[in-house]
Image (spheres, grey):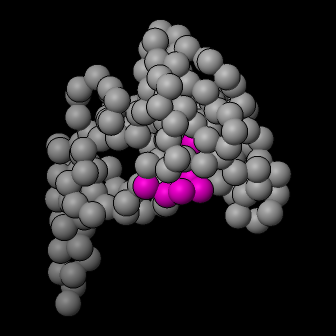
């Protein structure tokens, strides 16, 4: 019976070692992407990449105040968001008429809401004809219709994006 604490400690250390060695990330807090195990990869994020990204302090604090985000380990003290990259440098992004348009293609799967799930007004990133600059990504959920993403907070600086992720298990 006295050995149980030691066994539990050894199991915990083994799991921690595996997480560190294989750069694992567990999504248990974000509804923006499927719950599961993700692995960080060294690739440069591109269109379609799943990424964890910190947000600017102002945007992160707004997300925390609204209950969209929780405390976490980004420099702002708020959790990173988990999204897909939908547009990169040179892509033309417009948010108008209630939808997102990227390079002229209207994405009907990304309606832009004026109210959040609690009936509060949502600040929208309404921009017509915005070309992403070098060093910007446009992040959308692609998984949850009412996700808080670039439709509402705009593009994200590349240096805020943590390594891209690959889903290991949902």
> 5 left or right of 119?
left
In depth, the one of 16 and 4 nearer the eye is 16
- Compared to residue 161, the image places residue 66 above or below, namely below
> 146 left or right of 19?
right
Q: Position of residue 76 (x, y in %)?
A: 63, 35
Q: Position of residue 134 (x, y in %)?
A: 47, 9
Q: Quadrant of residue 154?
A: top right
Residue 102 appears anywhere in the view: yes
Q: Is residue 51 one of those drawn in magenta?
A: no
Q: Position of residue 166 (x, y in %)?
A: 24, 44
Residue that appears at 23% across and 73% down = 8
> 151 left or right of 122?
left
Main SS, magenta region, reads loop
Q: Quadrant of residue 149?
A: top right
Q: Position of residue 62 (x, y in %)?
A: 74, 43
> 121 left or right of 136?
right
Residue that appears at 67% across and 22% down = 128
Residue that appears at 22% across and 60% down = 169
**Quadrant occupied by the C terminus:** bottom left
In depth, the one of 166 and 85 nearer the eye is 85
Q: Quadrant of residue 35?
A: bottom left
**Magenta highlight range:** 143-149
């Amino acid at each position: 019976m006295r050995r149980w604490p030691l066994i539990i400690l050894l199991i915990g250390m083994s799991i921690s070692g595996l997480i560190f060695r294989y750069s694992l990330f567990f999504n248990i807090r974000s509804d923006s992407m499927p719950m599961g195990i993700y692995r960080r990869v060294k690739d440069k994020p591109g269109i379609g990449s799943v990424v964890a990204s910190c947000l600017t302090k102002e945007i992160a604090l707004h997300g925390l105040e609204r209950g969209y985000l929780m405390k976490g380990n980004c420099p702002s003290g708020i959790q990173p968001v988990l999204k897909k990259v939908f547009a990169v440098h040179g892509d033309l992004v417009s948010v108008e008429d209630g939808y997102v348009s990227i390079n002229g293609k209207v994405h009907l799967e990304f309606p832009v809401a004026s109210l959040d799930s609690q009936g509060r007004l949502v600040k929208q990133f309404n921009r017509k004809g915005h070309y992403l600059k070098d060093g910007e990504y446009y992040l959308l959920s692609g998984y949850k219709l009412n996700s808080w993403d670039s439709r509402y907070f705009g593009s994200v600086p590349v240096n805020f994006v943590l390594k891209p992720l690959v889903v290991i298990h949902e």
